[in-house]
Image: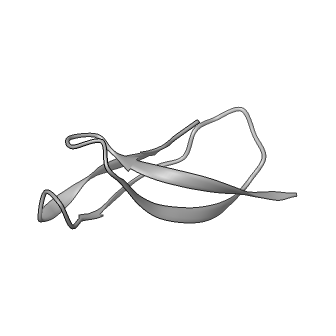
Amino acid sequence: MKNKAVLICEECLSRNYEVKKSTGPTRFQVKKYCKKCQKHTLHKEGK
């Protein structure tokens, strides 16, 4: 089953992306472009 997950920028804490993620114990993290920081930063899955 896939759930909607929100990705949060590690530097400015803005919520930039929504992704579909399969359920599991680990949190999703990926490097993506942040519009507010204007650079590529690590984005982690929010609660």
The image quarter containing residue 38 is bottom left
| Residue at 20% across, 41% down | 11
Q: Looking at the picture, how far across and down is residue 23, in whole percent?
A: 78, 46
* In-image side of 6 versus 17 (left or right): right
Place residue 44 in its image quadrant. top left
In the rendered view, tell whether residue 27 sits above or below residue 5. above
Q: Relative to residue 6, is residue 27 depicted above or below?
A: above
Q: Which residue sits at x=13%, y=57%?
A: 37
Q: How is the image coloured?
A: one colour
Where residue 8 sits in the image (x, y, percent)?
A: 40, 47
Residue extending farthest to the right is 1
Q: In this view, does 37 lie to the left or right of 21?
A: left
Task: Please give left or right for residue 30 compared with residue 3 in the image.
Answer: left
Left or right side of 36 for 17: right
Q: In which quarter of the image is the N terminus?
A: bottom right
Location of the C terminus by quadrant is top right
x, y percent for residue 18: 54, 63
Residue 35 pos. (x, y %) = 21, 67
Number of numbered tags placed on the structure image: 0
Q: Residue furthest top?
A: 25
| Residue in view at x 58 percent, y 64 percent | 19
Check the image and report above or below for 30 versus 35: above
